[in-house]
Image: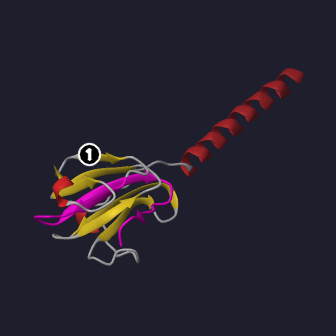
């Protein structure tokens, strides 16, 4: 009788463990999440007053955590010299993005990065940007709240 109770207890324990693991797997079910180009939702944050737009693809750059955003910059728009407290990791998706290093905007220092380029601007490095010939879309990736500190007004 003792053997039967021990076997029954072992079977019950195994069944409970399998049921628990199955319920955990369903609760953490992974699935593909995707956005088509038409599903990307562009908005104008209050800190953009020059026609730029932003889209949150993953996470929320205004709240922190891990995030991926896109920034759409109309032709002719420039951002004067500024810094960021965290690294800026940018991939040019469309157009040619011009970036220069320095504490004052200087068009002679701009270097063009065509679609497909990756640009890393380390935290604290003063830089400026421009969309010269046409509109530009840049994808930014980061961890922590996005912040720009302008050196020029």
Q: Secondary structure at mark 1?
A: strand
Residue drawn 62% across the image and 40% down it:
21
Q: Residue furthest right?
A: 2
Q: Magenta part of the protein: which range?
A: 126-153
**Residue to which mark 1 is pinned:** 118
Q: Is residue 129 magenta?
A: yes
Residue drawn 34% across the image and 55% down it:
140
Query: Residue 125 appears at what percent x and percent y?
Result: 38, 50
Mark 1 neighbour class, 10 Å CA radius: few under 14, some 14 to 19, many 20 or more:
some
Query: Residue 29 appears at what percent x and percent y?
Result: 50, 49
Q: Is residue 45 above or below residue 61?
A: below
Front-lying residue, 38 or 105: 105
Q: How was this image coloured?
A: secondary structure
Residue 74 relative to residue 18: left or right = left
Query: Residue 149 appears at what percent x and percent y?
Result: 43, 64
Residue drawn 46% across the image and 48% down it:
30
């Amino acid at each position: 009788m003792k053997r039967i109770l021990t076997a029954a207890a072992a079977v019950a324990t195994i069944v409970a463990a399998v049921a628990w693991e199955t319920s955990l797997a369903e609760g953490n079910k992974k699935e593909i999440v995707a956005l088509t180009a038409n599903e990307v939702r562009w908005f104008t944050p209050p800190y953009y007053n020059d026609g730029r737009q932003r889209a949150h693809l993953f996470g929320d750059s205004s709240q922190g955590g891990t995030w991926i955003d896109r920034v759409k910059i109309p032709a002719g728009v420039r951002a004067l010299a500024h810094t960021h407290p965290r690294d800026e990791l940018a991939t040019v998706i469309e157009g040619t993005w011009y970036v220069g290093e320095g504490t004052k905007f200087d068009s002679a220092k701009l270097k063009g990065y065509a679609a497909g380029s990756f640009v890393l601007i380390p935290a604290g490095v003063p830089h400026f940007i421009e969309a010269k010939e046409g509109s530009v879309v840049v994808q930014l990736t980061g961890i922590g709240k996005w912040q720009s500190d302008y050196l020029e007004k």
